[in-house]
Every structure is written in structure tokens, then in C-alpha cells.
Image (cartoon, coloured by chain):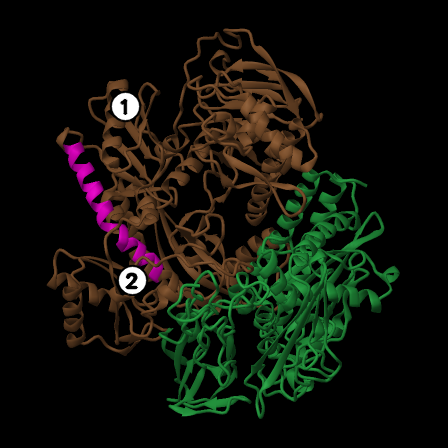
Chain colours: A green, B brown
């Protein structure tokens, strides 16, 4: 059935509106500071075969790619003929879902007049999932917390109370963790209701709408890929690693309107929580592709069609169970600069140099008689581009906000001495890299504060592009001494933790206009 | 909001907008209303004010007035044009870069080259002081005399005579901030000092710092402006009460406005919502969606029983006007309206979906829509409205200039060609899309406030509002539309109807079972008397001022709360169970669920003081007899979306319609500033005061 351009635009605008309304509702009802301060969640609607039609605008890049993959995996495992209209499934399996067990993925079928139309799905970072605190030091998934394989949470008019009891028994904050799952469930129901109101106005199925939207996005993206000269482009970059640096090898093969990325040559999976499941790797590469080629392209399945990503089994980007993945962002985010630097030769004006990435400071313990578990993000300098200096202290490629000093001090027994720009840390260049941050806190309590750092760029600096210089490396000090942060450590009263994040790489030779 | 009215009152309202300064004068005894409009004097807004006032005095025959209510865009313009005064910012040591760092997020996920809004204060004028409070507001290191003296030296060296202060945890305890202020004022009496704890009591230092910096940045301009204006009025022997409109939809006194000018930021839009409320109240309608559509943006806001929802955080001077997060955050109470880039000038352009979108780019006043014939070549909403028969090319803005139909057709044809649509289909599409955008934003706003669209009446204002209102209402599911008697003078009508309003906030962050009732009681008493005092200075009688307590409540662990009105008896009884029930009822009405096994906490307390507003009854003189007509209608073919065809519509002049008249659509009612378009079979009734009431079938 044909849809005219106006009809298509109205459908698109309504669909986005419904998803954003669901997102606003979720932010307001969530118990997780990561959801409300950092938008660490996403909502998508797919058709009956799991193809994404659209997603909430306020989302971080990873879930955009993982949610439709989850729906497809769901369809492989669950016979859709057995689904009831009120069914709701949950999982935090990293390979099924978002790449670490700290996110719940909820999937709800959408029925209309007895027929399966599609799915609403939401992924969100949970307040707590038990286990040790999130950190790079966890060596396998069993240390990371409670695993929930794909399970029905609700259906046939009743909830799965055994599962709920099981979750509540295994997490530190049962009311909040379940509160967030119920908040997600209520968003799924909201989406069902709204879609049921809107679809009949157009007499179209979600599959028919998907055909149109996907085809448009895919062909627009294919057209842009076609403009890149055919050939092989390669870049490798290194993460600090632990005993040894970890290699990120990114080979991009452009042929006509298709773009294939091969991650072969990257390091093998690690006995640390830095392993990246394939869906997460592909999500960040799809993000980078869109940002470089066509930032305004609508997010749907079409973005993935001209793109293929390969990584051999056992590679850090395709790890085997029971690999630990809690700090997957540390490696996954590096795929974006790796991809951009590979394409820099072909598209020098579209890319940015390597940047600092985002670091995470997790603090947990008990104070004033209550447990706490606080997550704080600290960013660094962004890489420079042909057009401009890199931004100072900005989250890239993810998009997480910092917490206010006043909030940090309320969440954990610490005092923040300073959070300021690390002047001169960005690499020099025709355009200089952005500056990182200097952040320092002091432990105030007699009881220990357990600290886990997910830090990047402490040994290997973000490189410049086109003759631009590297940014400064990150530094971490405990009472002015180097600290081993490959596992969690304790802060005692009076201990001072100092973190300097990396500056971004410069672009072009210093002193020259690019 | 409506209270007793002093029948001897002679009242004036003046609103300075971007293009025009509007005013109205109302004689309560006779109910006579006089309207004036003069161009805004961009560089000296006082001139426009005084010219408007002269015109009002002349037209009304007033020798003096009892009150003048004033709203101005001065604060917004000063922030956008960056022509405020240099500010020295005093902060806790370690947070000197907070304005430069912000929240570290990107407002556009995919734009690799975005830039941040430029902070109002540069790093060289930011001074850190070592004294420090902890999260409970207790002193970790006290401010010393030496520290204050050093600070004094620094301020003297900077040579800046306007200071903002934002210290960590000052929202819990403002004592250190006040010490800094008292010291600086004792040493430099001519300094102006703004404290973060005076402009906002919210937690989060970056947003509070941004707010107090903005306040300080505009404080001298606003003070100079208001003092000169006040002087000019007194020179003319005009000694009535001078009241200033704020963003939260109430007026405050001159002194309060001078100290906290940042509260004036959104007074115009707030007045627009109040104007819609006044129009509805006159008709006995209590649940509305105020809908305003101008040249560049459309705004929508719900109001129930005369009250619109408030927000405590919004943005000013965005790098990208419609991108959330790209502006400077300001944390003061403001009417929580939704604004989108949809207006008469919004441009339609092809996009990557193989379709096209309307807005947010606008052709503005220059070059304007293609049909203005001023060089615009891209099709806009106004061009589409013209092509579909909604506008009369010879009678636009009272015939002050002719619209060029051929130019509109050419622009529409250009877009249509790229998409395989003829001119008419392109125009139909533009109108459908812009209506959809506005309906979508309105629908979301209505849902966020827990309301059912079918219970609301849409009140349309602005030049393009009545043209699009009926179809927008139909798309949202609203069944009644009202167009008041002066849809262009909405803000001023709102100003006159406005009551006094001010508030005091206090952070709490305590569970209901942990509240410190004695401390709360003391605060309420103090806040009540302060807030009432402020309104008394604005000319209200103490006994007319009422106060109400609201709590921002949430489940322990959530970030965002909901404002819940609590009656004072409930508090006196310390009835936490009733407070929890009030919260859960409100929560369920908005989110459809309650969370089991979780405790409820109060994030923030609010004491709001209100003074009565006055009902504004505007009567439009009509030459026609009751229920009759003074002229026969014309006819024109207009496009009806409901029938997907052009239909013949009667075209009435507004001043030819008299109260009590009932008509049936399709029809158009024209007046100088706008046209009311009813492109479907709806009933139209002329209310006793001249308002049009459209009931959708």
C-alpha cells in the first residue's frame, strides 16, 4: 500500500512523539540516577519481525542498536503464537541484551485485533543488580551479579511472582530495582495503548510503515557510502589494558554502497570486565557511521542494512560466555575513534581525532546507617576536527552527564575538593584537542568507601590527526601516589583521590591553518 | 484567581514585546476598555512604554490610574544580545570552572561540531573562596575576616561593580553567602550583590550558579530601567501602584523585581496564558488549553481553575533555539508552557525521509513568507494558508499590505515538484504537518499534566492561532474552541487579570517519617510573612493575601518529584498518612501506577503567596442588534481537511457579528489581526461578550 510523503511524515512525527512521551514518563518515574541524570536508557518500537521503526530521541547510542537485536533474538527463542496481548518479558543477559547485566531489557508484544503488530522494547540501567560493584576487576559474569535469562515477567493476566521474589532477594535495593522494572513495564503498556489509538487512523500495519521508513533511511545512507571512494581503510588504536595494552583493529572495506567493518586482529577476550558483545560493538559503529555521513538521518533499521560488522569468536568484540562485560563501554567507545581515524584519509572533513572517552567513578558502602551505591561520570577532552578545536570536558561518543558536586556529596560520604578544567591537556594542532578535567575528592567517613574506577587513556594518549599532537594521558593518584585501579580499592577517612582525565588529540600541524 | 474588584479602579497594563508595545486601559466603573499599540523602542524601551501610556491616557480620558501592571522582554533581550553589565562571580574554591564545564553532555548526539553556550562570566572574573559548608549546611571551614578582606581586594582590583555569589550547599544554608554580601556591601556600598540562595533554593550548583550569574548580569539594566520609568511616572504625577509581571504568572513589587530581575524572564508568555485564562473565566470555562501561534513559534499550556502548571527549570539564549540543553539553565519558577518552532513563517523543506518537514526554521519578518513579496522563495505555512483560502490576499492585517498569491503558488510548486505533489497537495501537506506538530506537542503536554483532552477547551490567540486552532483541536481530541474578543492583546488582558504571586522554596530531602516538624513550622511562619510583605509592597492589602503550602514529593530514591498541594490542617495534624495518600493519588493520575513497598519523601517545600486578581470583562462594541447581523457575509472556497475537498465557506467580518448569533461551518470570521477558520461542520456561537465559541461535531 502506498503512503504519500505527507502521510509518512505525519506517521513519523506521531511515532516519535509517542516514543518521546514514553521516555519522558520513564525519566520521571525511574529510581535510577543514571536514567534521569544521564539518560542511560532507550525505547524502541519494532515491527513483528523485530525491525526498528523509531526510538526515543533522548537516548545514548548503544541501545539504539541493541534493542532491535534483542527483539530478533526474542523471536528466535519464543514462539510468537504463544504470546498473550499482555505479555512482558525481561532479561539482563549481556548477549541477548545490551552487553552488561546492569541493564534490564523489557520486551512487550503489541497486538491489534488479535494479530501481532510489533514490539515495544525498553532497555535501562538498573539501580542495582547484586554481585560485586561494577568495575573492571570482575573476572567473570558470576561476580557481576544476578543473571536473568529471558523470562516472562507478566502474561495471561498475572505476574511472575517467583521471578520477582528471586530478583528482590538478590539485589541491594529491591524496591528501587523492581520500581524501575515496573516503571518500564508501565511505559510498554503506554506505548501499546498509544499505538492502538494511532494505527487505525492510517489503516497501515507497523510492517507496512517499517517498509517505507527503513527503505528511505537505508537508501539515503547507501547513497552517502557510495560517495566514499571504494577501498580498504585501516586504523588501529590501543587501550591501556592491564598487563598489556588491548588492541582495537578496525578494517573498513567500502565497496559501492556497502560498508563492511572487520575487527579481526583486535585482542582476544580478557579476564576483566571489558569484553564487548557483538550487538554493542555494532551499535557504536552504526552511531559513528551516521555521525560521519548523515547526522540527520532518522534512526531505524535502515541504518544497519548497508553496514556489516565482523569479529571472530573469542575476540574482545565477540567474547564467549561467561566473560565479564560490566565495563564494556571502556572498549566499545574506542570503536568510534578507531572507525573515524580509519576513514580520515577518505573523509578528512567529517571526522574528529581521538578523544578521552568517559570515565566512571563508583563509590559504595554504608553511611549514616544506609547503604549507598553512587555512580559518577567524568569526561575528558574531545578530539579536534578540520573545522574546530575539540570541545573541553565533554562526553563522547556516549552522552552521559556529570553529577553536581552537591549531589555527589549527598550520595556518598566524600567531599569534592575540585572539578576544574585541566588546562593545556588537549593536543596541539591547527585545531587543538579539548581539555580534560581535574577532579579530586576526599573520604570523610570512618567506614571505608569502596571505590571502583573505569578509567581510560592513562597509559596511551588520544592521538592527533593530520599532524596534530596527542592529548595528555589521564592520571590517577591516591594521596599523591600511584594506585592500582584494575580492581576495586578502599578509601579510608582522609584519603584523597585525584583524577586527571585525558585531553583530546589535535588536528593538523600546529601553527598551520588547516 | 478572581477576587473582589474595586469598582473605582482605573487600571493599565503595558507589555513590551519584540516588535510592538501593547497596552490596555480599563475603567472598572464603566467596563470600558481602551487598547493601544506602538512600536517597541529597541534601544530605549522606556520611550515605547511612555508613548503607549500617553495613548492610553488620551484614549481613556484617565487623569491618573490606580495601578499599572508591566511586563517586559528586557531581561530576555539583555541575555540574548549580551549587553548586560560585567559580573564578578564568587564561588566555592574548586568550582571556578563550573560554568565552563556545565553538565558535560552533548545536546545533539550526532553533531560532532556543536558548541556550548558562552557563559555570562569569563574565568578571569570568577573568584574561589576556601570557606566551605557540608551537605547539611554546616560549616567545614568558617569564613575568616582575612578571607573576606582578600575577597574585597580582589573585587576592587577587578573593578567590577556587580557581583554574583554561589557557594556550595547554600541552598541548605545561605549563611556564608550572606556574610560575603554583608561584608562587600559594607565596604563597597554601591555594589550590587546577587546571592544564589536568594534566586533559587534548589540543589545543583551549576544550574544555581548559572541562574545567579544571569540575575546579576541583568540587575543593573533592570534597576536603571525601572527607576527611570518610576521617576517618569512620578514626574507626571502618576502615583498609582507599579506592579511587575513575573514568569510564574503573578505580579510582584518594584523592589522585588529590581532584586530578582531574572524572575521577569518569561513574563510575556506568562501573560499570554493568563489572557487565555481571563477569556475562559469570563465564559465560565475552567479547564483550558491556551494556544498561541505567531510568526515563528507556537505555545501551548493547560490551566485548570485559573492555575497553570509551573516549572522550576528552563533555558535562555539557546545555541540552537529548539534544542533542549543548548542554552543557559535558569532555575526560577515559570509557567510551564510548551513552545515549538511552528508559526506562520515556518518553512517547509524536503528531508531525508523522502518527505518534507515544516519548521523549526522560520522566514521571520524578513524575507517573510513568499506571499509577502519581500524576497522569500521557500514555501511557508502562511503561503499554504493563502493557497487553501484561509487568508484573504486583499484583507491581511486590515489590508495594510497585499499578499502575492502567485508568489505563494510558485514557492509551493517548487516543493511539490521535488516530491511529486501538485501545488494544492503541497499546501494541504504543509498545513497538515504544522498542525500535527502543534497537536503532538500539545498532546504530550496535556498527558504530562495528567489531563484528558476531551475535558479541555482550546483558547486561541496570536496572528496564526485562530487560523489553525479548530483543526489542531480536532487532532488533539479537544471538542471546543474559543477565540476571545481581542486575540492580539492577550498578554495585557492577562496582566490585568493577574493576581499577585510570590513564593519561597526550601529544600527538604526527607522522608515523611523523618520530617522535622518544628523547623518546618518555623520556616512556614517566616516564609509566609516575607512573601506577604512582598505583595503588600505591590499594593495589596495584607488581609487579601492568601498562602498555600505545596510539597514536591517523590518515592524515596526517585529524582523528579510531583508538586502536591497540601492543606494546612493536614500539616497541623502532622498527618503523614494523608500526605502520602495525596501524593499517591496524584502519582497514579499521571503515571497510571503506584510503587509498592516504597517510602515517600519531600524533596522541596514551597510556600506560595497569592493576592486576588480582578476579573476582566472586555466588551466589544457591536453595531449589530442582539442576535442580528449588520452585513451579509461574503463567500470563498476553502479547503476542508475533514472532507479532503474545497468547500464554499461564508466569510464574516467579526464586527458584524452580535452576541447570541449562531452559525454553522464551514466559515471564516475575519478581523484586523487574524482570521478564525472553521473548515468543517462545526457550530459557532457568539458569546455575550463577543467571544466566538466553536463546538466541534
Q: Nearer the viewer, residue B213 or A22?
A: B213
- Chain bearing mark 1: B
Which disc, if any, is residue B56? 1
**Neighbourhood count class around disc 1 (C-alpha, 10 Å): few under 14, some 14–19, many 20 upward:** many
Evaluate if marks 1 and 2 touch, with contact meaning CB atoms under 8 Å apart: no
Please report the bounds of the magenta region as a residue range. Answer: B209-234
- Residue at 58 percent across and 27 percent down: it is B410
Secondary structure of the residue carrying numbered label 1: helix
Q: Position of residue B573 (x, y in %)?
A: 44, 59
- Chain bearing mark 2: B
Q: Can you say whether B695 is above or below A340 in the image?
A: above
Q: Report if residue B574 is visible in the image.
A: yes
Q: Quadrant of residue B2?
A: top left
Q: CA distance from mark 1 to mark 2?
A: 44 Å
Is residue B239 rendered to the left or right of residue B415? left
Chief secondary structure of the magenta portion: helix
Is residue A64 rendered to the left or right of residue B659? right
> Disc 2 designates what residue?
B122
Q: Position of residue A68 (x, y in %)?
A: 73, 62
The answer to whether residue A304 is magenta is no
Q: Can you say whether B231 is above or below A25 in the image?
A: above
- Residue at 25 percent across and 66 percent down: it is B124
The answer to whether residue B212 is magenta is yes
Q: Earlier in the sequence, mark 1 or mark 2?
A: 1
Is residue A176 rendered to the left or right of residue B63? right
Which disc, if any, is residue A416? none
Amino acid at each position: 500500500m502506498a503512503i504519500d510523503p505527507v502521510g509518512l511524515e505525519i506517521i513519523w512525527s506521531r511515532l516519535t512523539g509517542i516514543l518521546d512521551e514514553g521516555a519522558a514518563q520513564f525519566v520521571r518515574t525511574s529510581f535510577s540516577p543514571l536514567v534521569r541524570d544521564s539518560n542511560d536508557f532507550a525505547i524502541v518500537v519494532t515491527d513483528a519481525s523485530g525491525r526498528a521503526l523509531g526510538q526515543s530521541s533522548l537516548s545514548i547510542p548503544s541501545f539504539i542498536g541493541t534493542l532491535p537485536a534483542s527483539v530478533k533474538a526474542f523471536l528466535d527463542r519464543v514462539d510468537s503464537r504463544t504470546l498473550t496481548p499482555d505479555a512482558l518479558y525481561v532479561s539482563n543477559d549481556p548477549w541477548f541484551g545490551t552487553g552488561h547485566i546492569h541493564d534490564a531489557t523489557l520486551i512487550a508484544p503489541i497486538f491489534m485485533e488479535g494479530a501481532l503488530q510489533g514490539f515495544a522494547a525498553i532497555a535501562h540501567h538498573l539501580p542495582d543488580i547484586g554481585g560485586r560493584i561494577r568495575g573492571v576487576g570482575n573476572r567473570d559474569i558470576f561476580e557481576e551479579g544476578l543473571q536473568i535469562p529471558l523470562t516472562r515477567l507478566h502474561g495471561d493476566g498475572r505476574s511472575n511472582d517467583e521471578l520477582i521474589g528471586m530478583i528482590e532477594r538478590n539485589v541491594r535495593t529491591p524496591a528501587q530495582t523492581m520500581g524501575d522494572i515496573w516503571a518500564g513495564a508501565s511505559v510498554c503498556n503506554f506505548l501499546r495503548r498509544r499505538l492502538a489509538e494511532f494505527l487505525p487512523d492510517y489503516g497501515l500495519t507497523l510492517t507496512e510503515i517499517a517498509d517505507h521508513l527503513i527503505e528511505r533511511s537505508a537508501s539515503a545512507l547507501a547513497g552517502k557510502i557510495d560517495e566514499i571512494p571504494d577501498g580498504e581503510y585501516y586504523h588501529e588504536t590501543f587501550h591501556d589494558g592491564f598487563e598489556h595494552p588491548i588492541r582495537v583493529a578496525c578494517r573498513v572495506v567500502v565497496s559501492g554502497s556497502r560498508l563492511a567493518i572487520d575487527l579481526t586482529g583486535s585482542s582476544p577476550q580478557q579476564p576483566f570486565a571489558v569484553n564487548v558483545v557483538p550487538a554493542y560493538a555494532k551499535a557504536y559503529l552504526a552511531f559513528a557511521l551516521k555521525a560521519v555521513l548523515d547526522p540527520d538521518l532518522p534512526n531505524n533499521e535502515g541504518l544497519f542494512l548497508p553496514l556489516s560488522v565482523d569479529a571472530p569468536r573469542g575476540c574482545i568484540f565477540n567474547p564467549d560466555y561467561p566473560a565479564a562485560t560490566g565495563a564494556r563501554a571502556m572498549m566499545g567507545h574506542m570503536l568510534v575513534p578507531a572507525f573515524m581515524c580509519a576513514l580520515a584519509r577518505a573523509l578528512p572533513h567529517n571526522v574528529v581525532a581521538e578523544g578521552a572517552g568517559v570515565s566512571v567513578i563508583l563509590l559504595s558502602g554504608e553511611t549514616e546507617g544506609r547503604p549507598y551505591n553512587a555512580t559518577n561520570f567524568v569526561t575528558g577532552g574531545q578530539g579536534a576536527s578540520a573545522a574546530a578545536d575539540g570541545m573541553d570536558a565533554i562526553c563522547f561518543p556516549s552522552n552521559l552527564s556529570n553529577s553536581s558536586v552537591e549531589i555527589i556529596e549527598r550520595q556518598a560520604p566524600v567531599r569534592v575538593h575540585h572539578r576544574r578544567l585541566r588546562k593545556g591537556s588537549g593536543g596541539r594542532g591547527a585545531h587543538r584537542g579539548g581539555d580534560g578535567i581535574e577532579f579530586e575528592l576526599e573520604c570523610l567517613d570512618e567506614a571505608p568507601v569502596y571505590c571502583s574506577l573505569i578509567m581510560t587513556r592513562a597509559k596511551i594518549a588520544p592521538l592527533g590527526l593530520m599532524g596534530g599532537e596527542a592529548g595528555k594521558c589521564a592520571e590517577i593518584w591516591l594521596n599523591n601516589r600511584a594506585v592500582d585501579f584494575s580492581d576495586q580499592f578502599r578509601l579510608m577517612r582522609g584519603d584523597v583521590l585525584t583524577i586527571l582525565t585525558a585531553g583530546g588529540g589535535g588536528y593538523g600541524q600546529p601553527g598551520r591553518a588547516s | 484567581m478572581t477576587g473582589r474588584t474595586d469598582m473605582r479602579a482605573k487600571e493599565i497594563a503595558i507589555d513590551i514585546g519584540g516588535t510592538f508595545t501593547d497596552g490596555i486601559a480599563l475603567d472598572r466603573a464603566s467596563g470600558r476598555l481602551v487598547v493601544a499599540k506602538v512600536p517597541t523602542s529597541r534601544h530605549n524601551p522606556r520611550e515605547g512604554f511612555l508613548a503607549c501610556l500617553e495613548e492610553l491616557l488620551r484614549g481613556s480620558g484617565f487623569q491618573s490610574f490606580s495601578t499599572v501592571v508591566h511586563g517586559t522582554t528586557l531581561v530576555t533581550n539583555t541575555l540574548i544580545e549580551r549587553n548586560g553589565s560585567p559580573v564578578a562571580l564568587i564561588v566555592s574554591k574548586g568550582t571556578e570552572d563550573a560554568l565552563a564545564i556545565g553538565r558535560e553532555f552533548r545536546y545533539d548526539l550526532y553533531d560532532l561540531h556543536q558548541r556550548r553556550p558562552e557563559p555570562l562570566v569569563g574565568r578571569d572574573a570568577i573568584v574561589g573562596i576556601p570557606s566551605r559548608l557540608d551537605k547539611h549546611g554546616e560549616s567545614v571551614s568558617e569564613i575568616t575576616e582575612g578571607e573576606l578582606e582578600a575577597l574585597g581586594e580582589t573585587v576592587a582590583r577587578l573593578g567590577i561593580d556587580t557581583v554574583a555569589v554561589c557557594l556550595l550547599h547554600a541552598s541548605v544554608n545561605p549563611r556564608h553567602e550572606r556574610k560575603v554580601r554583608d561584608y562587600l556591601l559594607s565596604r563597597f556600598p554601591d555594589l550590587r550583590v546577587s546571592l544564589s540562595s536568594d534566586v533559587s533554593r534548589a540543589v545543583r550548583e551549576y544550574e544555581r550558579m548559572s541562574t545567579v550569574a544571569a540575575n546579576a548580569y541583568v540587575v543593573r539594566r533592570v534597576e536603571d530601567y525601572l527607576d527611570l520609568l518610576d521617576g517618569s511616572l512620578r514626574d507626571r504625577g502618576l502615583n498609582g501602584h507599579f506592579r511587575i509581571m513575573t514568569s510564574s504568572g503573578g505580579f510582584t513589587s518594584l523592589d522585588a523585581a529590581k532584586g530578582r530581575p531574572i524572575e521577569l524572564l518569561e513574563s510575556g508568555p506568562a501573560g499570554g496564558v493568563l489572557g487565555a485564562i481571563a477569556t475562559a473565566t469570563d465564559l465560565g470555562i475552567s479547564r483550558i488549553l491556551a494556544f498561541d501561534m505567531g510568526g515563528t513559534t507556537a505555545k501551548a499550556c493547560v490551566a485548570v481553575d485559573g492555575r497553570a502548571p509551573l516549572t522550576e527549570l528552563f533555558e535562555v539564549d539557546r545555541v540552537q533555539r529548539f534544542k533542549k540543553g543548548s542554552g543557559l539553565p535558569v532555575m526560577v519558577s515559570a509557567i510551564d508552557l510548551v513552545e515549538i518552532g511552528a508559526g506562520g513563517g515556518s518553512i517547509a523543506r524536503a528531508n531525508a525521509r523522502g518527505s518534507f518537514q515544516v519548521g523549526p526554521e522560520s522566514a521571520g519578518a524578513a524575507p517573510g513568507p513568499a506571499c509577502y513579496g519581500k524576497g522569500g522563495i521557500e514555501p511557508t505555512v502562511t503561503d499554504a494558508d493563502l493557497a487553501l483560502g484561509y487568508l484573504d490576499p486583499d484583507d491581511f492585517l486590515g489590508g495594510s499590505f497585499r499578499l502575492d498569491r502567485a508568489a505563494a503558488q510558485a514557492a509551493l510548486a517548487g516543493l511539490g515538484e521535488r516530491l511529486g505533489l501538485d501545488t494544492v497537495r503541497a499546501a494541504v501537506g504543509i498545513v497538515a504537518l504544522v498542525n500535527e506538530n502543534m497537536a503532538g506537542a500539545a498532546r504530550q503536554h496535556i498527558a504530562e499534566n495528567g489531563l484528558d483532552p476531551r475535558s479541555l477547551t482550546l483558547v486561541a490567540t496570536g496572528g496564526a492561532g485562530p487560523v489553525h486552532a479548530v483543526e489542531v483541536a480536532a487532532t488533539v481530541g479537544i471538542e471546543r474552541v474559543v477565540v476571545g474578543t481581542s486575540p492580539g492583546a492577550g498578554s495585557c488582558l492577562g496582566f490585568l487579570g493577574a493576581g499577585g504571586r510570590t513564593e519561597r522554596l526550601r529544600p527538604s530531602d526527607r522522608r515523611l517519617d523523618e520530617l522535622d516538624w518544628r523547623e518546618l513550622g518555623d520556616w512556614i511562619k517566616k516564609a509566609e510573612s516575607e512573601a506577604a510583605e512582598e505583595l503588600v509592597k505591590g499594593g495589596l492589602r495584607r488581609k487579601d493575601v492568601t498562602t498555600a503550602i505545596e510539597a514536591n514529593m517523590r518515592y524515596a530514591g526517585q529524582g523528579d518529584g510531583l508538586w502536591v498541594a497540601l492543606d494546612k490542617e493536614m500539616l497541623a495534624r502532622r498527618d503523614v498518612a494523608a500526605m502520602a495518600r495525596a501524593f499517591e493519588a496524584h502519582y497514579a493520575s499521571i503515571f497510571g501506577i503506584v510503587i509498592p513497598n516504597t517510602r515517600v519523601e519531600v524533596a522541596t517545600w514551597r510556600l506560595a503567596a497569592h493576592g486576588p486578581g480582578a476579573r476582566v470583562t472586555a466588551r466589544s462594541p457591536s453595531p449589530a442588534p442582539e442576535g442580528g447581523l449588520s452585513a451579509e457575509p461574503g463567500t470563498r472556497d476553502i479547503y476542508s481537511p475533514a472532507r479532503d475537498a474545497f468547500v464554499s465557506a461564508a466569510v464574516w467580518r467579526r464586527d458584524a457579528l452580535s452576541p447570541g448569533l449562531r452559525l454553522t461551518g464551514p466559515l471564516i470570521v475575519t478581523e484586523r489581526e487574524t482570521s478564525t477558520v472553521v473548515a468543517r461542520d462545526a457550530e459557532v456561537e457568539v458569546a455575550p461578550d463577543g467571544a466566538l465559541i466553536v463546538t466541534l461535531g
